[in-house]
Image (cartoon, rainbow, N blue to C red):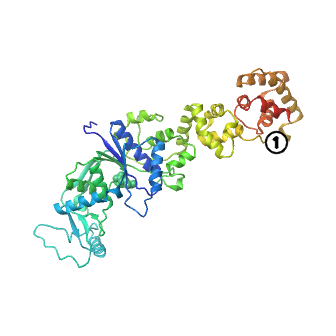
Amino acid sequence: MTITTPVRTRFAPSPTGYLHLGGARTALFSWAFARHHNGTFVLRVEDTDIERSTPEAVQAIIDGMNWLGMQADEGPFYQMQRIERYREIIAKMLEEGTAYYCYSSAEEVDAMRERARMLGMKPRYDGTWRPAPGKTLGAPPEGRSPVVRFKCPQEGATSWDDLVKGRISFDNGELDDLIIARADGTPTYNFCVVVDDWDMQITHVIRGDDHVNNTPRQITILQALGATIPEYGHVPMILGPDGEKLSKRHGAVSIMDYDAQGYLPEAMVNYLARLGWSHGDSELFTREQFVEWFDTRNLSKSASQWDPKKLNWVNAHYIKQSDNATLAQLVAPRVAQSGADPEATDLEAVMGLLKDRSETLNDLAEGALLFCSPFVPAPAELQAEVLTDEARAVLQSFAQHAEALDEWTTESLAQAIRDTLAANGIKMPKLGIPLRVAATGRKQTPAIDAVLAILGREKVLRRLNEL
Ligand code: GLU
């Protein structure tokens, strides 16, 4: 695609809740498109639904964007702070005749719609107050405040080449004369979007395909204003694993819940990017590669499906790739949250031991408890089962080998284990299981030599000697 003007994209959430996965994904596409073209990514808060919009929701959306690392270059701009500007454009359109006052009451409009329906036509406003050459309008009913309607062209069609879906066309005859200002003067949703996209010089609108039906309305108004029409790309929705529209029923839908559950932002970006976009058969890529490769031509026309298993696989990959110090830093607060002391061990070494087998930071934190929580000896039953006289003798033998070590490392402990096995003529399980139970209180742990190395000489020998 050759793009000559500077690219400007926008994310335009309605702040009525958290940043949900669908919103995060379309934001990510708009962000990547802007970055790919060295353009500008604008954040616009569509807060005109004052009943449902809250400052907390705005913050939650910004937090989510920051967490994913897709900061806006401009904004946040708030629609509620732009009301004067919308009014100004409405006045201009009334003056120019591209909009008109409509005095029909809501009941009258309902009746018009009903009549159209009965005639087998699309329910619409019948144009009673729409000015036309040679037409005389009635006298405005006393005391009724009018709405303002856009005088939508009735002939021809409104079409665009959707960046995702290809050519889309609507007959103008099907489009109603949209209300752009309510009787109390407040501008309506589609109108605010139009003025904003115009004023903010948005060149590419990438958004959910629930907005396809709004697009011809927005284009016709932009045309009436003499504005440049942006390119539109409508991204299909995300379905849950069961094929239904993704919702709370499928688990967390707020992006920040994934932070709480121990997903890394880079994994989330990678996973979300692949939901409806692809680059050959690449599944794992960096943020930089994503930006470099991003092209709307590779956005999928069909809905994508949320796959928690794949997300875990992607997250596990990023965990494995992270260095131990970074992981320790991210995991420490999670360990503390579960009441243990992250300082009680060499957390970096613990990360090194656990990161190949963990899918989330929370898995890592849970695994780290073995090293950070106060020692809880194995339950009596397990002790009775595993710590037989024979096993205790083997453990004593191991303790002697271990005590003699100059250096207490995974390698030296592995050697001490091998020496103990040889000296007693036994195989690993005869030592491994009792050693785990005695030193950690558990039957299952990661590699025992590494576990003992991290626990340290003092703790391990004390636990063995106290048997
Ligand atoms: N505020 C709209 C929404 O949250 C988005 C509008 C747009 O992208 O044009 O669905």
Whether the residue under disc 1 has CB within 8 Å of ligand 1: no
Q: Nearer the viewer, residue 14 or 449?
A: 14
Q: Height in image: 281 above or below 216?
A: above
* Residue 222 makes an appearance in the image: yes
Q: Does residue 175 appear left or right of residue 333 in this picture? A: left
Q: Nearer the viewer, residue 4 or 108?
A: 4
Tell me which residue sits at (46%, 55%) in the image: 57
Q: Does residue 392 appear left or right of residue 77 in this picture? A: right
Residue 348 image point, x, y percent: 63, 32
Quarter of image, res 333: top right
If the image is split into quadrants, where does the N terminus sit? Answer: top left
Q: Height in image: 467 above or below 412?
A: below
Residue 183 image point, x, y percent: 29, 70
If the image is split into quadrants, where does the C terminus sit? Answer: top right
For the residue marked with disc 1, what is the amino acid? Leu
Q: Does residue 360 appear left or right of residue 65 in this picture? A: right
Tell me which residue sits at (68%, 46%) in the image: 339
Residue 323 image point, x, y percent: 57, 31
Quarter of image, res 344: top right
Residue 349 image point, x, y percent: 65, 31
SS at mark 1 in the image? helix
Q: Height in image: 355 above or below 145?
A: above
Q: Nearer the viewer, residue 384 or 23?
A: 23
Tell me which residue sits at (88%, 32%) in the image: 390
Badge 1: few (under 14), some or many (20 or more) residues near its Cα, within 10 Å? some
Q: Residue furthest right?
A: 389
**To which residue does mark 1 refer?**
382
Ligand 1: which quarter?
Answer: bottom left
* Residue 234 makes an appearance in the image: no
